[in-house]
Amino acid sequence: MTLPITPSLRLDGRRAIVTGAGRGIGLAAAAALGQAGADVTLVSRTASEVEEAAAMIGPTATAAVLDVSDIMAVKAFFAARPAFNILVNNAGTNRPKPMWDVSEEDYHAVYDLNVKSAFFVAQACVHKMIAETAQGSLIHMGSQMGHVGGPNRSLYCGSKWALEGMNKAFALDLASHGIRSNTIAPTFIETPLTKPYFDDPAFKAHVLSKIKLGRVGQVEDVMGAILFLASDASALMTGTSLVIDGGWTAD
């Protein structure tokens, strides 16, 4: 009889990239990967944020300024670098409002970043991975709102449901290349982007009534899932979603 050995969560020798990495969940993702031994590239449009974040992580972290909505710049960025083994496709936005108030400009702002940019970042990353026969893991930052609906969230829900569908198709296209694709679907996580929403007592009460564990999420609640999906511990997982919602979607 042979005793099984738990697959490692270490990422030593692997190259990782995180978009939207200057703060919030993106910064937490980069920290988790760096702390597990990966060489991690932090991408953001804001140089000061991402440089400070990379310095905090340490010498294995690199800051890079890139606007992921500029598709030609994205293609050039990945083409100029060795293949990455791990992508955290995190950049995203939200414009919460009733569906009758949504403008065409609102629509394009949310879908262009949350769907179009996510697609072409993944594509550019994969092109280099396939060319260099680099296996690995794509992790797309979805949302519980990619599994349910929500008031004033027609744009956000639509974009995150789209990401879930894209992810499943990515997984099927990429499986033969040894590249996995999964999403993480958090509930409301307290970040610089979301914190102002909780200044509204009614909004905060609604959110807490839906999160059955009784608290708003923190970025640390997502870090373990990122590490799990990036590592050999999830070697047989692809085309699915890790829902970190405190019970929201169970109701």
Image (spheres, rainbow, N blue to C red):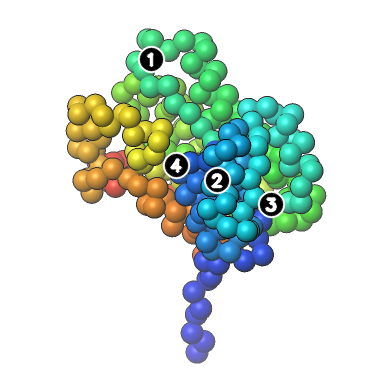
Q: Earlier in the sequence, mark 4 or mark 1?
A: 4
Q: Amino acid at mark 4?
A: Gly
Q: Work out how far the residue at label 4 is from the one at label 2, CA to CA, in angstroms.
A: 13 Å
Image point (55%, 45%), residue name: 52
Badge number at residue 24: 4
At which x and y percent is residue 91? 54, 36
Q: Is residue 55 above or below residue 37?
A: above
* Residue located beneath label 3 in the image: 84
Find numbered disc 1 in the image and state the secondary structure of the residue it sits on: helix
Find numbered disc 2 in the image and state the secondary structure of the residue it sits on: helix
* Residue located beneath label 2 in the image: 52
Q: Earlier in the sequence, mark 4 or mark 2?
A: 4
Q: Work out how far the residue at label 1 is from the one at label 2, CA to CA, in angstroms.
A: 38 Å
Badge number at residue 99: 1
The 10 Å Cα crowd at callout 3, few under 14, some 14 to 19, many 20 or more, is: many
Image point (48%, 28%), residue name: 93
Q: Which residue is more in the foreground, 248 or 217?
A: 217
